Image (spheres, rainbow, N blue to C red):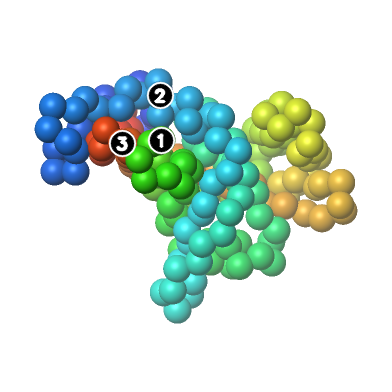
Amino acid sequence: MKIGVTMKNPTPQLDERFSQPGSEPVPWATTLEALESAQMFWITTVRADGRPHVTPLVAVWLDDALHFTTGPEEQKALNLAGNPRVALITGCNRWDEGLDVIVEGAAERVTARPALERLAAAWAAKWDGQWQYEPTENGFAHDQGGEAHVFAVRPAKILAFTKGAFTQTRYLPTD
């Protein structure tokens, strides 16, 4: 992952191999809205033996990165300790309509107190206060008494797939 790259206003690139003739790329604003408003994502991590591990989770898009949490002993945390590469997916489970978005990148721990405070506020705001986190030196504490590590994924690539009028759009970070 290159330091200093962002997804502020990437240029959408239509992949004509996987898009209907005459189609247009998905505008970045549409994909960004999907990332900001999605209530559920699926994360894929890689186990030590190379097998994939997929699990649902909630995430927050903030500062050009997708953020998620996991308990330090959960399978995804164990996987990330050995291989930080992930794919996070959100979208619609219909064939004939909707938008699916995939974020690929490396997960990095977030431990800086100001970032954790902003993220805790973002989680609370996104879910009308249903997700309450307290920043700690290791990540977040939550009201069930547990600890959560916080990770940021700065995208190496984002893909958006429309269904019905089928398109595949790629966004790469800008310097």
Query: Which element carries disc 2, helix, strand or loop?
Result: helix
At horizontal 32% and vertical 22% (from top left) the residue drawn is 27
Foreground mark, 2 or 3?
3
Quadrant assignment for the C terminus: top left
Q: Are marks 3 and 1 in contact (CB under 8 Å)?
A: yes
Three-letter amino acid code of the residue under disc 3: Gly
Residue extending furthest toward the front: 96
Which percent across, then down, holds residue 29? 40, 21
Residue 149 on image: x %, y %: 67, 52
Q: Amino acid at mark 2?
A: Thr
Report how far apart the C-alphas of labels 2 and 1 lie in the structure.
Answer: 11 Å
What whole-number distance in Å separates the C-alpha atoms at marks 2 and 3? 16 Å
Which residue matches tag 2?
Answer: 30
Question: Which is more toward the observer, 153 or 3?
Answer: 153
Q: Which residue is mark 3?
A: 164
Q: Is residue 174 left or right of residue 129?
A: left
Along the horizontal axis of the image, is 125 left or right of 153? right
* Secondary element at tag 1: loop
Q: Residue 141, position in %: x, y?
A: 80, 47
Residue that label 1 marks: 98
Would you identify the image quadrant in which residue 71 lies? bottom right
From the image, state whether disc 2 or disc 1 is nearer to you: 1
